[in-house]
Image (tube, rainbow, N blue to C red):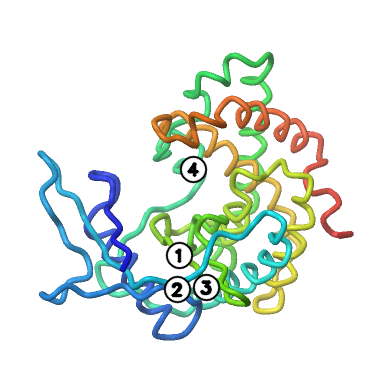
């Protein structure tokens, strides 16, 4: 079994129970391969226990074999993930969530704005140590806001998403790729799931190949419009700004301590590429 202990005060009991309800439905309809949530003796899927003055929630999943994909395997894995993501999106277009279902909304304000769960990118001290970084990232944010406002939130582009489909949340077991960790699932742009799939790797030279593979897999299951593809650079840049803020809000983690300086510097370089129109400009020819 795998026991997941939730950070106290981060997700509500209702949000966690809603997450498990979606996972259960995905398994029932065989939409994606994801581990089964286990039920406590009293029939509940989420258990609450005291944690100081707060309450901590715990969920137990069946153990699933597999390991995180190696970066050299990402091109093949991304095609599978693209197909699975499209299956998720196609499912939510017709699924009626149960009464009381509640999950976060991943719009502009909750990703890179004032209501972001991880704060603002300018809260990360390293941003202010790089010449022109604040100006460049602010310009990138302004363009993201304009692009997403124009793109809109129609039912064909905005709905329930996984919200964190990065490599650490994939279990590769031979030809099987299992999806885990729906803790960030919520209502957002469908193409944001692609941006999440390249989290912390947005400046890798193979980015265009990975995105092209993901799109091939996705299009086999669910059709994309030209505007869906055109918005991808803006969503990748938005995700990068969110993760730049994450580096400060989760500064206690070993990963943030190890990469925060280089990641912030890379964010500035990615923003310059984004503003010049060069980010993923070659993806259609890959």
Q: Position of residue 84 (x, y in %)?
A: 58, 73
Q: Residues within 10 Å of mark 3 (few under 14, many from 20)?
A: many
The reply to whether the C-beta atoms of the residues labelled 3 and 4 are less than 8 Å apart is no
Residue 186 sits in which quadrant? bottom left
Label 4: which secondary element: helix
- Residue 180: image tag: 1
For marks 3 and 1, the one nearer the N-term is 3
The residues tagged by marks 4 and 2 sit, at their Cα atoms, a distance apart of: 26 Å
Q: Residue 34: which disc?
A: 2
Q: Give the foreground label among 3 and 2.
A: 2
Spatial CA distance of label 1 from label 2 is 6 Å
Image marks 1 and 2: residues in contact by CB distance under 8 Å: yes
Indicate which label's residue lies in the foreground, 4 or 2.
2
Label 3 with label 1: CB-CB less than 8 Å: no
Front one among 64 and 164: 64
Label disc, if present, on residue 88 of the rendered structure: 3
- Name the residue: 17% across, 62% down: 47
Q: Earlier in the sequence, mark 3 or mark 4?
A: 3
Label 3 and label 2: CA atoms lie apart by: 12 Å
Name the quadrant of the C terminus: bottom right
Mark 3 and mark 2 residues within 8 Å of each other at the beta carbon: no
Q: Which mark is residue 111?
A: 4
Q: Position of residue 190 (x, y in %)?
A: 57, 62
Question: Which label lies toward us, 1 or 4?
Answer: 1
Between the residue at mark 3 and the residue at mark 4, the CA separation in whole angstroms equals 21 Å
């Amino acid at each position: 079994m795998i026991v997941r202990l939730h950070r106290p005060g981060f997700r509500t009991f209702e949000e966690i129970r809603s997450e498990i309800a979606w996972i259960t439905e995905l398994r029932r309809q065989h939409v994606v391969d994801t581990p089964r949530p286990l039920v406590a003796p009293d029939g509940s899927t989420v258990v609450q226990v005291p944690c100081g003055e707060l309450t901590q929630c715990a969920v137990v999943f069946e153990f699933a074999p597999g390991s995180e994909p190696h970066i050299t395997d990402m091109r093949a894995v991304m095609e599978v993930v693209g197909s699975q993501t499209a299956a998720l999106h196609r499912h939510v277009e017709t699924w009626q969530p149960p009464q009381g279902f509640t999950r976060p909304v991943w719009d502009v304000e909750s990703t890179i704005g004032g209501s972001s769960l991880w704060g603002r990118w300018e809260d990360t001290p390293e941003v202010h140590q790089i010449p022109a970084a604040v100006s460049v990232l602010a310009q990138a944010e302004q363009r993201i806001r304009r692009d997403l406002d124009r793109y809109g939130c129609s039912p064909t582009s905005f709905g329930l998403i996984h919200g964190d489909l990065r490599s650490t949340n994939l279990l590769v077991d031979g030809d099987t790729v299992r999806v885990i960790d729906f803790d960030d699932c919520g209502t957002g742009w469908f193409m944001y799931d692609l941006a999440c799939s390249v989290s912390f790797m947005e400046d890798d030279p193979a980015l265009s190949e990975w995105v092209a593979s993901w799109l091939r897999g996705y299009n086999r299951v669910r059709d994309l419009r030209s505007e869906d593809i055109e918005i991808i650079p803006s969503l990748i840049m938005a995700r990068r700004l969110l993760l730049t803020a994450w580096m400060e809000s989760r500064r206690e983690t070993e990963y943030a301590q190890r990469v925060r300086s280089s990641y912030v510097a890379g964010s500035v370089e990615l923003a310059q590429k984004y503003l010049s129109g060069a980010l993923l400009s070659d993806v259609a020819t890959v």
